[in-house]
Every structure is written in structure tokens, then in C-alpha cells.
Amino acid sequence: MTRNAPPRPRLNRDRVLRTAVSFADEVDIDALSMRRLAQELDVTPMALYKHVADKEALLDGMIEVIVGEIDPPLTGADWRDTVRHRVLSARRALQRHPWAREVIESRSRMTPPVLGYLDSVARGFLDGGFSPDLTHHVMHALGGRVWGFTQELFDGSRASASAPAPSPEQQAAMYDQMAAAFPSLAVVASSAAHSGDVVGRGCDDDFEFTVTLDLMLDGFERMRAHGWTSVAALSSVAAGRPAVGAAL
């Protein structure tokens, strides 16, 4: 007597997207294609197009999955804790999926879930007493940091991710060369521990990200408390005064 094979899980959009995310995590985002994803799901490529229109729609949907991993807004907290919590949660989500930053930066349009996340961050500022004008400018100031990432000054990790790590002897020689040619930069770069080595393997660790985020949030609060507006700032610039300093 032949046993019937267990039925395959029903194919739906959520399963397609989560399988794509898992594939990108475990294999590589560059290796992901509609045909390869169909193989992972054991379906024909045409079956996928019932759930995602094309590769771009697939990538949009994968980012929606990542957005769904970001913690919801805090309740009963002040604006600073609310925004800080959301940004750091977004950072943790992207750290679980290292390919997500590249995909986010490649998007030419924003889907409703992405807009919903950005809307919730903006709402955190507005509910905290920020004017729409100031909220507009602080959101620009946050930039990619609202997703938990930033291009750091000493970060060479993205360009050299596939390069072998230098040996301790090579690191020492590189540092000696930098110290001889650029002594001030060498002192600054070697002043604290980083997530990588001192010379060019990446300084964007969680501590540095959080310190910078806290500095920005403190600055935003001072601007809010002093009633900063872009009109006043432009007037200050026209008069030859610092835009922020004049308001504070």
C-alpha cells in the first residue's frame, strides 16, 4: 500500500516573500531570481507571478517583511524614547538581514508598509510638540539613520567586504603608515575600540550609532524647545548668522 505524500503548503504571497527573505539571508541577495525562488518553493516560475508581479515587486515585498519585524511604537513614552526605540529596533532588524540596506537604498518608490513606518516616526515627533516644519527638517537630518544605518566616516567594510582580513602584522604596518602620513587622523581613529580593526574594517558599531543618534535627538529637542523654524533660520543665514545658533 502506497502512502499519499503530504500536501505541499499552500502558495501565497506571504510564503513567497518569507522564502525570498530566508534565501537572501542564507545564500545571497544577488543570487535571488524568480527562477531560483521558484526552485526553492518547488513550483513553476509562472506560479510566482500570481503573487508578485516581477523581481522589483518581490524586493519591495521583502522590505515589507523587514518592516514588519520593527517593534511597534511605545505607548505612554515621550517623543524621544518613542523615536529612539523605533530607530534602534529598525537597526536590529537590518542587522538580522545584512542585504536589506542595499535593497532599501535601491528602491525608487515607497510601498504602504514603508510609508507607514516613516509616518509613525514622523508622528512621534509631531506628538512630541514638534512643528511640521521642524519635523520635516529633522527627518531629513536623520536620513538613512531612521532605518538604523549610516555611511560612517571610517567605514570601508562595504567596499572591501569580500577582501581577506589583514593579518595583525599587516594591520600594524598599515597603522604605522597612516600615523606617519596622517598623525591626527591616526590618533582619532585609534582612540577607541571598534567593531573591526582600526584601519578601514568598519567603525559603525552599535555604540557609535547610538551615541550619534542620542546627540541628534538632544539637538532636535533644543530646537523644538526654542521654537526653531526654517523661516527664522533662513533669515539668520541671510543676515550672516549661524542658522541654528541664532535660534538657540
Image (cartoon, rainbow, N blue to C red):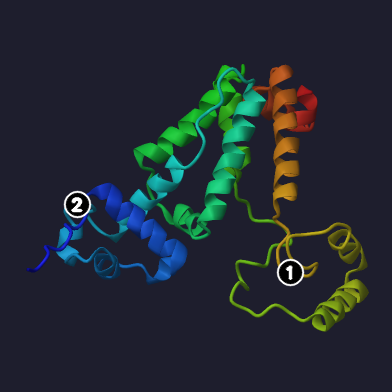
Q: Is residue 239 visible?
A: no
Q: Position of residue 16 (x, y in %)?
A: 28, 55
Q: Which residue is drawn at the image coordinates 87% and 59% (left, top)?
A: 188
Q: Disc 2, disc 1: CB below 8 Å?
A: no
Q: Dot 1: within a 10 Å radius of its alpha carbon, few (fewer than 14), some, or many (20 or more) residues?
A: some
Q: Is residue 122 visible?
A: yes
Identity of the amino acid at label 2?
Answer: Arg
Foreground disc of the pair 2, 1: 2
213 sits to left or right of 124? right
Q: Report the front residue among 231 and 122.
A: 122
101 sits to left or right of 248? left
Q: Position of residue 242 (x, y in %)?
A: 78, 33
Residue located beneath label 1 in the image? 200
Q: Is residue 108 above or below residue 244?
A: below
Q: Which residue is drawn at the image coordinates 70% and 47% (left, top)?
A: 209
Q: Is residue 107 above or below residue 89?
A: below
Label disc, if present, on residue 168 of the rendered structure: none
Q: Dot 2: within a 10 Å radius of its alpha carbon, few (fewer than 14), some, or many (20 or more) residues?
A: few
Q: Is residue 187 above or below residue 218?
A: below
Identity of the amino acid at label 1?
Answer: Gly
Q: Which residue is drawn at the image coordinates 74% and 62% (left, top)?
A: 154
The image shows a total of numbered marks equal to 2
Q: Report the front residue among 227 and 35.
A: 35
Secondary structure of the residue carrying tag 1 is: loop
Q: Position of residue 33 (x, y in %)?
A: 31, 68
Q: Report the front residue among 98 and 60.
A: 98
Q: Which is more N-terminal, label 1 or label 2?
A: 2
Quadrant that contains the N terminus: bottom left
Q: In 3D space, how far apart are the residues under numbered discs 2 and 1 (Cα atoms)?
A: 47 Å
Label disc, if present, on residue 10 of the rendered structure: 2
Q: Report the front residue among 95 and 123.
A: 95
Secondary structure of the residue carrying tag 2 is: loop
